[in-house]
Image (tube, grey):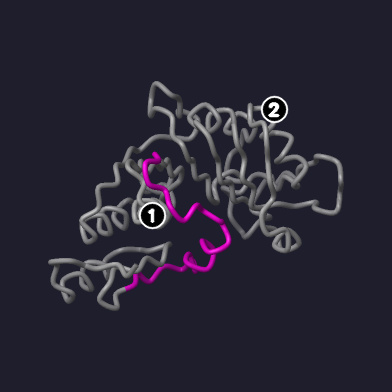
Amino acid sequence: MRRSAGFRDADKVRAEIADVNWYHRIDLGDGIVTPGVDDTPSRFDVLDMPADLSGNSVLDIGAWDGFFSFEAERRGANRVLATDSYCWSGEGWGTKEGFDTVRRTLGSNVDDLEIDVMDLSPDAVGTFDLVLFIGVLYHMRHMLLALERVASVTGDQLILDTHTAMTEDERPVMLFYPENELNNDYTNWWGANPPAVEAMLRDVGFRKTERKHPEFIPTGRLIVHAWK
């Protein structure tokens, strides 16, 4: 389905997106795509998100510009909540301006809440049929505790996409980045290998895990689906 900028003037939309520092590339229709530095559509294609989310609630943790939130809505989710803290607060180089611009342009009903991963709980946000935790876990200083918080708000399924390291070791191990060793970024803390990620997911209450597209593991990318 092609996105549409709807009733908004295309030139006005182009002017609005020109003022934003974008991470995600989001198709707004009318030939307008946000100029994100991340090739988000290609990254999304291998997540294996359900094609039909009708009747489901979706939580997007670390939403940033909101690509995955708006895609979940497009796939029929009856409620989508986008959350972020670091990117929306302006502590990094991103802001919430991109998310707000896309939501306004698309006429979207995606909800938003600025909240840290460590503050997630059923009381704070509720529980969701599907939780998206994309590109966030390796930024967490306390990785297992972060997964506990994520598990607490997952009603059924989690889709996790994270950096991985030490992938040749069959033991559950993690590589610690005390400074900016990973991508020259001081916010990257850990590279957990696939057995470690799966073991932590089981420890926090997921009964089943499944690695997706293992061909990406040698490149440092791990995609795991987990179910309660």
Could you say which disc has been placed on residue 203 in the image? 2
* Residue 199 against residue 101 in the figure, above or below: above
Secondary structure type for disc 1? loop
* Residue 149 against residue 70 in the figure, above or below: above
**Comparing marks 2 and 1, which lies closer to the viewer?**
1
* Residue 147 against residue 221 in the figure, above or below: above
The amino acid on which the numbered mark 1 sits, given as a three-letter code, is Arg
Q: Nearer the viewer, residue 159 or 179?
A: 159
- Residue 104 spot, x, y in % from top left: 21, 56
* Quadrant of the frame with the C terminus: top right
- Residue 125 spot, x, y in % from top left: 38, 29
In this rendering, position of residue 99 left or right of residue 148: left
Mark 1 Cα shell of 10 Å, populated few (<14), some (14-19), many (≥20): some
- Residue at 43%, 44% in the rendered image: 60
In this rendering, position of residue 119 left or right of residue 159: left
- Quadrant housing residue 103: bottom left
The amino acid on which the numbered mark 2 sits, given as a three-letter code, is Asp
**Residue 35 covered by magenta stretch:** yes
Q: Nearer the viewer, residue 36 or 105?
A: 105
Q: How many marks?
A: 2
Q: How far is the residue under mark 2 from the one under mark 1?
A: 31 Å
- Residue 127 spot, x, y in % from top left: 43, 29
Q: Nearer the viewer, residue 66 or 18?
A: 66
- Residue 114 spot, x, y in % from top left: 35, 38
- Residue at 53%, 34% in the rendered image: 156
In this rendering, position of residue 205 left or right of residue 49: right
Tell me which label, 2 or 1, sits earlier in the chain. 1
Magenta part of the chain:
33-57
Q: Residue furthest top?
A: 123
- Residue at 37%, 46% in the rendered image: 54
Q: Which residue is mark 1?
A: 75
Could you say which disc has been placed on residue 51 in the image? none
